[in-house]
Amino acid sequence: MSTGKQRIDGAAAFLLHAHPYSETSLILDVFSRPYGRLALLARGARRPRSALRGVLLGFQPLELSWFGGGEVKTLARAEWMGGIALLSGKCLLLGYYLNELLLKLLPREDAHPVLYDAYADALGALSRGSAEAAELRRFEKILLRELGYGLALDKEVASGEPVRADRQYVYLVERGAVEARDDEGLPSISGKTLLDLAADDYDDPRTLAESKALMRQLVAHYLAGQPLQSRRVFVELQDL
């Protein structure tokens, strides 16, 4: 969705990334509910006395106004809306992981209000100290679906038969589940895990482990070789 050269007032948004521009300004990559991901120029935001310094916070709900055309609009106003505690520790790293997925996979100026709400829900869970994989799996599923890569989890792609909890399957990227054969050489996943993943039921430890492996495979495919720095940092910290 293009915003043209109009002025946008009071759009709900989150800051995904910021980098310096000139000596006093920032380029912001934001995810707004009505307009999707877009770039904004925050003039003077790096000045010591700028009112924006305490407002442009990551993982916090913001209300932004901007104007202009082209790829980079100009930020006119920013207000911190509150309601989410600051992330820390493992939850902070998981927040960076969510942001990286949006930055690398989500096209600019394409509205995804359902995905925006899923992101806000995931941040809310992380802010309450929930670092469970379930929060990430729900977000990853909605992200892929919103990008047009929805998962076929409850039916076997070859036969159209319902997936059975007591059988083993392999998941073929961009196709779906097929019953596992001994000679395929692909990692298998239980039918119960596929059905649990479809229902967002992560109570079974096996479901948590197998769904994590499956989503990692799918996300890596759609990233097409782009590395995730948040995952690298997380692994390095675990090694320490």
Image (spheres, rainbow, N blue to C red):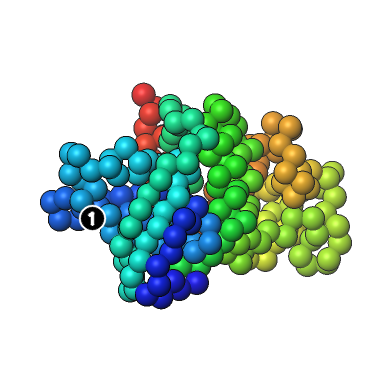
Residue 97 image position (x, y, % from top left): 45, 44
Residue 48 image position (x, y, % from top left): 18, 39
Q: Quadrant of the C terminus?
A: top left
Give the vertical position of 29 relative to 197 (above or below): below
> In the rendered image, is residue 144 in sight?
no
Residue 233's image quarter?
A: top left
Residue at 40 percent of width and 67 percent of height: 7
Residue at 32 percent of width and 37 percent of height: 54
Under mark 1, the amino acid is Arg
Residue 134 image position (x, y, % from top left): 64, 38
Furthest toward the left, the residue is 23
Q: Nearer the viewer, residue 9 or 200?
A: 9
Residue linked to disc 1: 43
Give the vertical position of 67 relative to 98 (above or below): below
Q: Residues within 10 Å of mark 1 (few under 14, many from 20)?
A: some
Residue at 79 percent of width and 61 percent of height: 156
